[in-house]
Amino acid sequence: MEKNAEERYKRWLADPSISEEDKKKLRSEDDAKLQDAFYKELEFGTGGMRGVMGLGDNRMNVYTVGRASQAFANYINKSVKGEKSAVISYDTRHMSKEFAQETAEIFAANGIKAYLFEEFRPTPILSFAVRHLRATAGVMITASHNLPKYNGYKAYWSNGAQVIPPHDEGIIREYKAIKSFGEIKRISLEEAKKKDLVVMVSKEIDEAYFEKALSLSFKSVDPSLKIVYTPLHGTGGKIVPVLLEKDGFHPYIQKEQGVPNGDFPTVEYPNPEDPKAFKLSLEDAKRLNADIIAASDPDADRMGIMVRHNGEFVRIDGNQMGVLLLNFIAEKYSEKGMPSNPTAIESIVSSKMFAKVARSFDVDVVEVLTGFKWICNVADKLREAGKSVIFSYEESYGYNIGDFVYDKDSATAIMLTCEMASEYKKKGMTLVDALESLYKKYGYYFETQIAPVFEGEEGMSKIKAIVEALRKTPPSTLAGYTLTKVTDYINGVGDIPPSNVLKFEFGKNLMFYCRPSGTEPKVKFYIMAMEFGEKEQAMSTLNKAKEEILHLVEEFSR
């Protein structure tokens, strides 16, 4: 083990707050596993704290979760006067319920009233509940769409959005200030309930959420639309089918994946971005002659869609769905009256077609950093300034409509997607037809992503090397196009705060972004072929660019 890892490891062995059983497990591990478990501490990234479950500073466990909760409680108590409260929810992963209960016990011991969900609930319900209950903060225990070995801790502020500066920085300072797990305060859940410091919540929050979501319905419902829905063993089964039924649809729930299970046994990767996650629901859809398949990830903030077109099921990617939903919402508002100062928000790495469609409806567009914590906090400020934020999205299947959830919300997005599919079905069109009509109007915009994985300490070094190599020696050409502009976001650009993101433009038709993931051991490349008159030319350019960037990644990671 390297010195820093060994020092952290020895601190764990010397800490009386760590059980003898856990110390025994640590002593039985080999040096390679201990090095990876202790070479660094988990940090708050774009989605809070997330990591592999196990023992160690670089792992999700009762000690690191307890430390995070104590740090969050310390920050709340130092920065907020008067009565304080927090809402806590969790997904279907292993240890999620235990981590959530532990968080509630620690908040209660620190005088912060905890509203704890009796059963697992999706991320959008947590965000809604923070706003609905006028809580000071919120915590969602989830690793979103990551593999089963992961779990995570998302921290929310009083507006229902994930924390950004100065709050995340303040929590991190408090986290680092805790030197021993013995500093963590706890009272039992039962004692906290008796003292009214923990209040269990459940369906009353769901019903309030459904009321708000249904207020956004355009009533474009064709009950004959055949829908197959899969929650991928996650939390979406609690809200998505109910909301669709309340809106007038009759979805079929994929049976095997409708069973909550933290092992996600029927999928390699519980992510609606992955076409393989649709295998079972696709079989059902073919058998039932369905029109549309909808999927949500384990914490039900992201959604994915496939639609039947010319007898085959076609995947609609995250950018395409963002453009389709924006166009549908803007058209509907244009019919009944557009809100004052309409605005749409997208992340910087999302499709540039989005802005073109928005401006055709006289809707302003604001770009923000990747992550819904940025989108929703910016939406909050825009609303305070008198803007009407009608829709927000990012390419990784995240969508938000309305002002009652301040995070990605798969349920409301699936509801409106089904309404949109209903409307086009009445015209004899599918969503694929609708997308093609938009391409013919605005030009062909195609996007793809490369996200090579580099795990562990060595992987972090490779990710850093790849980004720095691109920063120092960007490619002069890509797919036959000449580099015309490089934008480095490391010191911020305009209203966009500093971030380790690079943008490379090759004239008006080609660009790509590069950024390390904030939640996974990946470096992400977002490649965009834009504004082509011919579909084949756009796709050919995109594929060539992808091949050349893959070659660069291989070269820079050696």
Image (cartoon, rainbow, N blue to C red):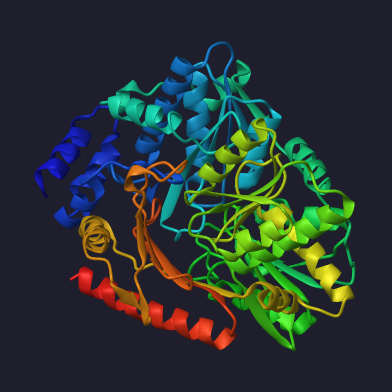
**Position of residue 331 measured from the top left corner of the image (x, y, whole percent):** 80, 59
**Position of residue 373 measured from the top left corner of the image (x, y, whole percent):** 52, 43
Q: Which residue is pictured at 48% across the width and 52% down the height?
A: 370
Q: Is residue 505 visible?
A: yes
Tell me: 512 left or right of 114.
Answer: left
Tell me: 206 left or right of 122.
Answer: right
**Position of residue 374 measured from the top left corner of the image (x, y, whole percent):** 51, 43
Closer-to-camera residue (411/449): 449
The quarter of the displayed image where residue 127 is located: top right
Query: Which residue is farthest top?
Result: 82
Q: Is residue 121 visible?
A: no
Q: How many marks are shown on the rendered structure?
A: 0
Q: Which residue is pictured at 65% across the width and 80% down the height?
A: 314
Tell me: 320 left or right of 537.
Answer: right
Answer above or below: position of 406 versus 321: above
Tell me: 193 left or right of 38.
Answer: right
Closer-to-camera residue (48/336): 336
Q: Which residue is pictured at 59% across the width and 19% down the height?
A: 197
Quadrant housing the C terminus = bottom left
